[in-house]
Structures are given as structure tokens and as C-alpha cells.
Image (cartoon, rainbow, N blue to C red):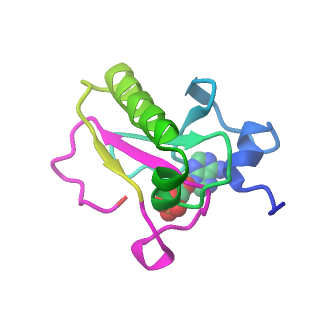
Amino acid sequence: MSEPSVFTRILQGEIPSEIVAETERAFVIRDIAPQAPVHLLVIPKTQQYRDVVELAAGDPALLAEVVDLAHRVAAEHADGEFRLVFNTGASAGQTVFHVHAHVLAGGLDEVSTGA
Ligand code: AMP
């Protein structure tokens, strides 16, 4: 078993963060370093998948649940339109290897495509 990721530690209450929404298998927090007016992270509760490629291959239904939850929180926190970013690999900017989707919303005119 690998070391708990920062997101697993948040889920277990070891690192403080408000869980703003959740389903049986995924949860949502605010990014600690927001890159847009609304910047949320949708995270599977399992850390079994490092990135979205592994998640899509291993549990496509969970990936669909992540996308659905992203839409739900984008509707709650903005107008329901959003950019969904999965940084995949260190050279693409991924720093936490527990798959997560960045939900960027709320006026993206000034925001670049990177999260
Ligand atoms: P990535 O670089 O795509 O792996 O995204 C990791 C994201 O997690 C970054 O945008 C960080 O700002 C965010 N992050 C790291 N630690 C925390 C934390 N304790 N609470 C909320 N967001 C965090």
C-alpha cells in the first residue's frame, strides 16, 4: 500500500479542508491555490488510480461519476459551464498522483488553459 496522498489525508480528516460536495465514490474540495474565480478539485475517494488514463481504463463508471460531479458543482458555484483539466504526468504539471479533475469556472477570460 502506498503512502496516503494529500487528498486521502484530507478525506480522512488529517489535513484540514472543507469537503464542498461528495458522492459515494468521489468528493470535492476547493483548490488551495486557485487559478480561476471558481477552482474546485473533484477527486475519487480511492487513490488506486494515479491519473485519468488509469482511471478511464480501470473504472470508466467512476470517471463518469467524476465528470457528473464536476458539472453539479459548476452549477452550484458558477453558471454550470466549466473547464475540466486533468494534468497527466509531471511534465504536464501533475504534482499529486492521485487522480483529480480541476474544475475551473466563473469567468475564464483571463485564465490560461493550464491549471
Ligand atoms: P496537480 O498539479 O494537477 O497534480 O494538482 C494538484 C492540486 O492540488 C494543485 O492545484 C494544488 O494547489 C492542490 N492542492 C495541494 N494541496 C492541497 C490542499 N491541502 N488543499 C487543497 N488543494 C491542494
What is the magenta range? 87-114
From the viewer's perspective, is 110 left or right of 77?
Answer: left
Residue 93 drawn at (x, y percent): 44, 71
The residue positioned farthest toward the left in the image shown: 109
Which x, y percent locates residue 68?
A: 39, 29
Corner quadrant of residue 104: top left
Q: Where is residue 87 in the image (x, y as percent from the top left)?
A: 42, 62
- Of the 4 image quadrants, the one containing the C terminus is bottom left
- Residue 2, relative to residue 71: is it above or below? below
Task: Decide which of 94, 56 is in the foreground and name it.
Answer: 56
**Image x and y of residue 64, in percent:** 42, 36
Q: Does the magenta stretch include residue 13?
A: no
- Residue ranking furthest to the bottom: 91
Left or right, residue 101 beside residue 11: left
For the N terminus, which image quadrant?
Answer: bottom right
The image quadrant in which ligand 1 is located: bottom right
**Residue at image point 56% right, 42% down:** 43
Q: Looking at the magenta stretch, what is its main secondary structure?
A: loop
- Please name the residue shown 62% across and 29% down the image: 19
Name the residue: 41% across, 26% down: 73
As drawn, 74 above or below 60:
above
Depth order, front residue of 10/22: 22
Q: Nearer the viewer, residue 49 or 14?
A: 49
Residue in view at x 39 percent, y 23 percent: 72
